[in-house]
Image (cartoon, rainbow, N blue to C red):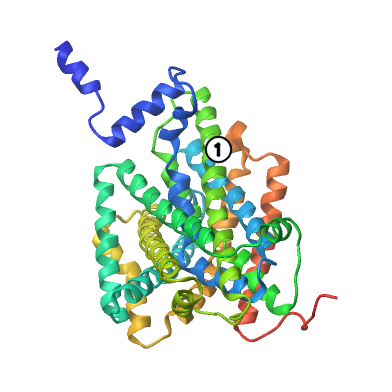
Amino acid sequence: MNEAISQAAVPQTLTEQTCFDIRETLAGRRRGLRTMLPFVGPAVVASIAYMDPGNFATNIQAGAGYGYTLLWVVALANIVAMLFQALSAKLGLVTGSNLAELCRSALPRRCVLAMWGISEIAAMATDLAEFVGGAIGVSLLTHLPMVPSMLITAAVTYGLLQFEKRGFRPLELAIAALVGVIGLSYLAELLIAPVHWSSVVKHTFTPGMPDSNALTISVGIIGATVMPHVLFLHSGLTQNRVKPRNEGERAKLLRFSNIEVVVALGVAGLINMAMVIMASSAFHAGHADMASIETAWRTLTPLLGGAAAGLFLAALIASGVSSSVVGTMAGQMIMQGFVGFHIPVWARRLITMAPAFVVVACGVDATRALVLSQVVLSIALPVPMIALVWFTSRGDLMGRYRNRRSTTIAAVTGTVAVLALNLILLLQVAGISPWPPFHAG
């Protein structure tokens, strides 16, 4: 009998081993840098949203059109992202519920149904950008039309989603590997492209806005940085990973979570900056009007060689596939949290990717579809941002972990700023310019 008990206590899977390692660290029996590794996962998964194909398109335009000038915008957007992802992770750890579940329990039914509808539309719009972006990469690699490329992307995405049946850890590691592909690809790109590093440092810390078009691109970078679906998702990834047994363990989990958010989102920010730097080095001098992912890939070969184009394609495919996986996970969590529906992953996958097939089948340009999806996200963004700030500021819900006054002020300021920028983005897409053209003196 004792032997049976000891065997049952031995971790049998990657997920069980991770939970065991976390428990050992929380109990104080493990120390050192290695103790951080089991806690890494939720923020890495969430960070994919900040490296999706929509970021590729925006960053290419920023670098090609304005060189290194808008790097400071990318850095600022990343700081805002860190704040909100940290709040989302904290909500799940402290309450044991995700953002959608809390909305369902705290708000009137009509409001909940409206929020669910808006969030479902946001999830589909998110997947449209991510799924189409991945399919563009497959199409460029295989020279197949978009529809067959989308089917290949769908099959790969569904295959990755099957990892979740083995617990949270295998899927976290798979997504981390894809993040590694994106990061290493752009690191290699920076070694190939001629980079003026002193200008990179200067423009990272020195704000500058050359003209009104640069302001529009900046609005796109910041306004579409905080993704609605990952604000819902991150709270769900932390809520049941390892439940704290006392306040001391909860405090430790929050500390490790904040560290992971800073590191994971910091890496995502560096990758986004690398995208701008590469686009600046490759296109700014002679191809400042570069606007589409496909054109950027075709132009890279004569400018920097086949290796640079291949690395760009590898990063794009890894980005599209991984972000599509995360989008499906978020859609599942949103539906289950708001209305309690649980459907098979394959059905959820069909729901989220159906609009992408419709858009492409109707002949809409793929890059244009990416832009339109960002407009939909802009409309949906107030729902999770406002709810997240409200819930994490409530003492009756968060107790001693409620937001400090400075955190609340920063979060409210960030919310107002992002929503204002999204409104400007909507006006721009509608052809209404909220400001006259200007040029830096």
Whether residue 75 is visible here, answered yes or no, is yes
Expressed as whole percent of the image width and height from the top left, the position of residue 389 reads 61, 50
| Rendering coords of residue 131 (x, y %) | 37, 69
Nearer to the camera, 91 or 261: 261
In this view of the protein, can residue 98 be seen by the observer? no
Residue shown at 54%/43% (left/top)? 263
Against 149, is 381 above or below?
above
Q: Which is more toward the observer, 336 or 378?
A: 378
Q: How many marks?
A: 1
Q: Amino acid at mark 1?
A: Ile
Q: Is residue 279 left or right of residue 356?
A: right
Element on which disc 1 rests: helix
Q: Nearer the viewer, residue 110 or 305?
A: 305
Where is residue 9? Give x, y as percent: 25, 21
| Residue 234 in the image: above or below residue 426 | above
Q: Which residue is at 47% across, 80% downward?
A: 295
Identity of the residue drawn at 45% across and 23% down:
26
Q: Reply above or below: 178 against 261.
A: below
State the image quarter where residue 221 is shown: bottom right
The image shows residue 238 at horizontal and vertical percentages of 44, 41
Q: Which residue is mark 1?
A: 259
Give the image quarter of residue 214: bottom right
> Is 348 displayed left or right of 234 in the figure?
left
Quarter of the N terminus within the rendering: top left
Q: Depth check: give the residue in front, 394 or 264.
A: 264
Q: Label 1: few (<14), some or many (≥20) within 10 Å?
A: some
Image quarter where the C terminus lies is bottom right
On the rendered structure, is 187 left or right of 204? left
Q: Farthest top residue? A: 2
